[in-house]
Amino acid sequence: MTEERRQHPDPGAGTSRRRVMAAAALAPLLAAAPSPARARTAGAATEQVGLAQKLIEPVHTTRQDWTAVAKVLGGPGDLKRKVMYHTGFPRRDLRLVSHHVHIKPSLALGSHVSFVRYSDRSTLLMGDVVVTEGELQGFVDALQEHRIGVTALHKHLLAQRPDVWWLHVHGHGHDALTLARGIRAAFDETDTPRPKPSDQSKPDDLDTGAIDDALGAKGSGDDGIYKCIFVRKEKIVDGHMVLPPGLGSTSAFNFQPLGNGRAAISADCCMVADEVQHVLRLLRQAGVKLVELHNHGLRDKPRLFFVHFWAVGDAVRLARDLRPVVRATNVIPAG
């Protein structure tokens, strides 16, 4: 090495040595630190463990447990799967036409609310309500006054007359009667008739057995409408509350007879995000008209999406064409 280089050493040499020493010191720490992907996985696992520890399960009840609620609502309901007290409010007062079809209330105008009691003694209220455009704002104001939330506002039908809207409602608290009085006050802002038991007989002018075989589910009658219902296989939670199967997570295929084996179908399909685009393609391939794509809830896990759709034609053929839609989603028959 020359005298000049001894007196004026390379300024980068010291920097390089310092970098090597720093890297050596950090190596054990870097080896112990998780990668970003590993950190995300660990965080998700921790979150799932924490969620599982906090989940609140529904408890079994009887119809007698809801006698006071029924009195407030103005009519009797029924108990589904021993946990959901369900009351229907079909809009029998409306004379609605969509695509030249006179819509029966049970096809697409069936307001309903459900109450579920939980292990922490709280009560959950969820429902789907039909209101006219003139009733909409007053209905929402009454809900808000009684601290019941709106979680969705949308359409089930295309080009309907008169114009109606569908709202999903959500309430939670430790006094079921307070929730019942709140939803009753909102109904009182509309012309919704009082609850009335429906006729459960199957329509005579549809081959319901062939529809069952085509869709892979056993349906039931509801005031002249034939319905095939499916529920998601996953455990669905709303916040920290486990939702009973079928509460806010159903796929419903409703058939209204039109004569000579034909039917109008107003239906919705419940999906997770990864199923949505495939289902939409299958529906269009079946010649079905899409109406709405939206959510029904705000805090559901897994996140659920719903597509409402419309079709008119031979009932059995339509059921066969819709079977791939059922297969494309993680559902089982509700029965």
Image (tube, rainbow, N blue to C red):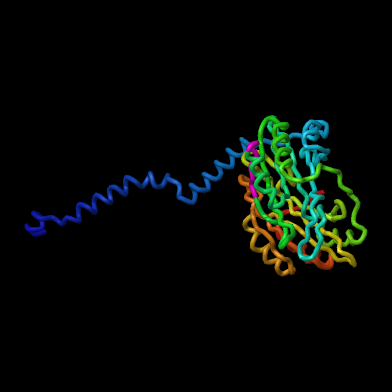
Residue found 81% across the figure and 32% down from its top:
67
Say if 86 sits above or below 308 in the image.
Answer: above
Q: Is residue 37 left or right of residue 184?
A: left
Quadrant of the rendering where the N terminus is positioned: bottom left
Q: Which residues are magenta?
A: 145-152
Say if 281 sits above or below 113 in the image.
Answer: below
Q: Report the front residue among 174 and 273.
A: 174
Residue found 78% across the figure and 38% down from its top:
85
Query: Is residue 150 found inside the magenta-colored segment of the image?
Result: yes
Whole-percent x, y for residue 278 in the image: 66, 63
Residue found 73% across the figure and 38% down from its top:
184
Whole-percent x, y for residue 154 in the image: 66, 54
Say if 84 sits above or below 324 in the image.
Answer: above
Say if 193 sits above or below 207 in the image.
Answer: above
Query: Is residue 38 found inside the magenta-colored segment of the image?
Result: no
Residue found 20% across the figure and 56% down from its top:
12
Q: Report the front residue among 37 and 28.
A: 37
Whole-percent x, y for residue 160 in the image: 73, 60
Q: Report the front residue among 59 and 248.
A: 248
| Residue 178 placement: quadrant | top right
| Residue 115 placement: quadrant | top right
Outermost residue, right side: 204
